[in-house]
Amino acid sequence: MRAEEAIDAVTSAAIGAGLPAHNATVVRVGENGVVLLPSADVLERVVPRAARCSNPRREIEVAVWLASRQVPVFTPHGRSQLSSGNTRCR
């Protein structure tokens, strides 16, 4: 994944969710991208199309469960949502 792709995906998702999308900063780019939106106090992970067979809802559930047991993880925000492009493979 390229940095530009990660920023474009996060900007689009933020706008769709009604969040401010300016000042997006790439934190990490590799197999997945991680982008910080400081204006919305959001850290987003971007998964390339080829890897979308994962279950992002399950990953959010696991993060919440880990946090409830005081494991230091990034926890989903109360308004967490998946962008329309993030769907589980069938």
Image (spheres, helix red, strand yellow):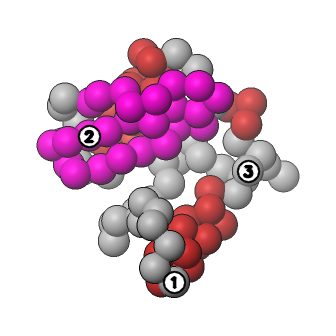
Q: Which one is in front, 11 or 1?
A: 1
Q: Nearer the viewer, mark 2 or mark 1?
A: 1
Tell me: residue 14, above or below residue 31.
Answer: below
Tell me: residue 53, above or below residue 11.
Answer: below
Please tell me which of labels 1 and 3 falls first in the chain.
3
Q: CA distance from mark 3 to mark 2?
A: 23 Å
Please tell me which of labels 2 and 1 falls first in the chain.
2
Disc 1, SS: loop
Label 1 belongs to which residue? 69
Label 3 belongs to which residue? 54
Residue 70 locus on image (x, y percent): 46, 79
Q: Is residue 16 visible?
A: no
Disc 3, SS: loop
Q: Residue at x 51, y 31 (%)?
A: 33
Q: Quadrant of the N terminus?
A: top right
Q: Residue at x 33, y 33 (%)?
A: 11
Q: Residue at x 48, y 48 (%)?
A: 83
Residue type, numbered disc 1: Arg
Label 2 belongs to which residue? 37
Q: Nearer the viewer, mark 1 or mark 3?
A: 1
Q: Which one is in front, 89 or 46?
A: 46
Start-end of magenta stretch? 24-47
